[in-house]
């Protein structure tokens, strides 16, 4: 089977993102996509915040989940996040964009392990590190091909 | 110092949730709150989905994060999530509500370890298990009292 | 393909444990094994401790890893731990045995999600909870059958 | 309060390691220790293996736990691991040493977030990556000073 080109993969990635209503709702943008690497960002607006005025932890975890899946997908094709963990390092305060940078650190034929760092990028372009995640991504095709509906059912996490 | 009553804690919890614009945006509701226990839910609507029509994994991780913090806060007072991990078990498909049930499984004066299970609850009231999380919650007051801005800065995750 | 009986699985599990030199070195014992459930324990001896006299966190993480794999293996057959996370709740102090109780909370054809609780059990039989883990277990056979050496290579964690 | 010098911290770290019977039992060596960084290694011997001849996952998790704590301790002083997660990337096969390299990626006054990579280093000095971990380390002194025995009790993980 021929490997898809980087352009094909990137077009596929942009198309997937546009098909995720939740990603669209939050204004998520795919900023970089290459083999083993993905960057997603979204604009920090007031309705993403929590009671102290910082971006809600759940927004950081959402963006990490999404970036982990795209980085894994860059080497696996259609992929899904099986699990991840996230550490919050600092409050995501201020204006600008929330940026998630994800890189594959290990992979086999059917799974990839990915690390992700989340930054607040100010309008001036300075960044500070606000969260760090690590997760496991698996190839969705093998699940979809499976005769077991529970396997196919794993195609959940976008 | 006198311990707050359950009613005071519950009123405090509801007030906190109303002060989280992101939680309000997603329609998050506090369904149960007692010492060591919290339940949050939100209505499953189409703009929470991903490309396969399932609820986006990022919504599940958001709701887990929020429920973990509230359960931890039920024993610690003002609290924040330091970190958590989530496993996706099945796609959150169908209609109804997404329900997160969180319980403290261990605690000290300043931190709590909490487990959370996320379910899809159909309009008929049946539930199926779609994600499992575990995380660490710390008391926010001790951070706020700290002379170190980086500690205070940890008050991020709502 | 016929499913193995509980007795066959249990005999297989005991045989696997005896083939793990590290588990044998630490005196690990398989105390319970049934579909979706496994219990492992080891005697607390002084050379398992750290500088404060508590059982070393690394011993707790080892026993969790091993119990997670066995619980996953009880539903998957030959299995391996892909990843796990552990929270330390209290110091594993005192004499007696370290006991890890692991239960499958979700599974598909090729993977299982497992939770594990680690206790210190005194010689009188009382237990206190000292750690909580959660992890992902995958079927080893599918990896072994794979044409990709990196997949087969995943058969690592015992 | 005066900050300890690097030499003082390093001497403290070596002394702590020598006081951990479990670390000594496995032949753990502190190979590097500076602000925000620690490297631990141990010789791969046959009784560390599992049934396939690879180093047992529990040994990798032990060494990660220990390296995470030392890296955190390099910036916090006396420290303990609250929690961590580990992904197994490849089987730790072959001869040589198991090497864990840990770096602080974020810190406040009382806690540090640390990443760790575990390698097999052959006798020729080549390395391959076999596991990746991420965890939360807290200052032990604050726990020890606490009036709450449950906090002091957290000094568990070495």
Image (cartoon, coloured by chain):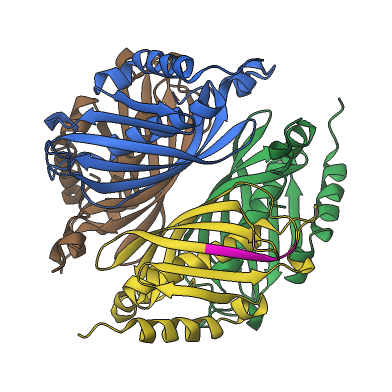
Chain colours: A brown, B blue, C yellow, D green
**Residue A31, located in which quarter of the rendered image?**
top left
> What secondary structure do most residues of the magenta stretch adopt?
strand
**Count of all numbered marks drawn on residues in the image:** 0
Q: Can residue A32 be seen in this view?
A: yes
Instruction: Give x and y (percent) for residue B42.
Output: 24, 28
For image coordinates 33% across by 33% down, the residue present is: B63
Q: Which residue lies furthest to the front in this view?
A: C124
Q: Is residue D126 visible?
A: no
- Please determine whether, in this image, residue A116 is positioned above or below residue A80: above
Instruction: Give x and y (percent) for residue A22.
Output: 20, 31
For image coordinates 67% across by 20% down, the residue present is: B148
Q: What stretch is highlighted in magenta?
A: C95-100
Let me know if residue D136 is in the magenta part.
no
Let me know if residue C97 is in the magenta part.
yes
Q: Is residue B16 left or right of residue B82?
A: left
Front residue (pair D130, B143): B143
For image coordinates 15% across by 39% down, the residue present is: B122
Instruction: Give x and y (percent) for residue A47.
Output: 30, 15
**Residue B61, located in which quarter of the rendered image?**
top left
- Please determine whether, in this image, residue B1 is positioned above or below residue D118: above
Front residue (pair A111, C97): C97
For image coordinates 66% across by 54% down, the residue present is: D67
Front residue (pair D109, A123): D109
Instruction: Give x and y (percent) for residue C69.
Output: 45, 69
Q: In this view, does B81 lie to the left or right of D14?
A: left
- Please determine whether, in this image, residue D45 is positioned above or below residue A51: below
Q: Quadrant of the C terminus of chain A?
A: top left
Q: In which quarter of the image is the N terminus of chain A?
A: bottom left
């Amino acid at each position: 089977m021929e490997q898809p080109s980087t352009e094909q993969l990137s077009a596929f990635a942009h198309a997937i993102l546009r098909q995720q209503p939740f990603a669209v709702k939050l204004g998520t943008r795919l900023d970089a996509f290459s083999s083993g690497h993905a960057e997603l960002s979204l604009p920090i607006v007031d309705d993403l915040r929590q009671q102290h005025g910082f971006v809600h932890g759940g927004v950081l975890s959402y963006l990490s989940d999404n970036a982990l899946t795209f980085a894994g997908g860059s080497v696996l094709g259609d992929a899904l996040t099986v699990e991840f963990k996230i550490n919050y390092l600092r409050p995501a305060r201020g204006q600008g964009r929330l940026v998630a940078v994800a890189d594959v650190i290990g992979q086999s034929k059917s799974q990839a392990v990915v690390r992700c760092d989340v930054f607040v990028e100010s309008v001036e372009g300075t960044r500070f590190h606000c969260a760090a995640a690590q997760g496991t991504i698996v190839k969705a095709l093998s699940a979809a091909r499976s005769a077991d509906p529970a396997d196919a059912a794993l195609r959940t996490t976008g």
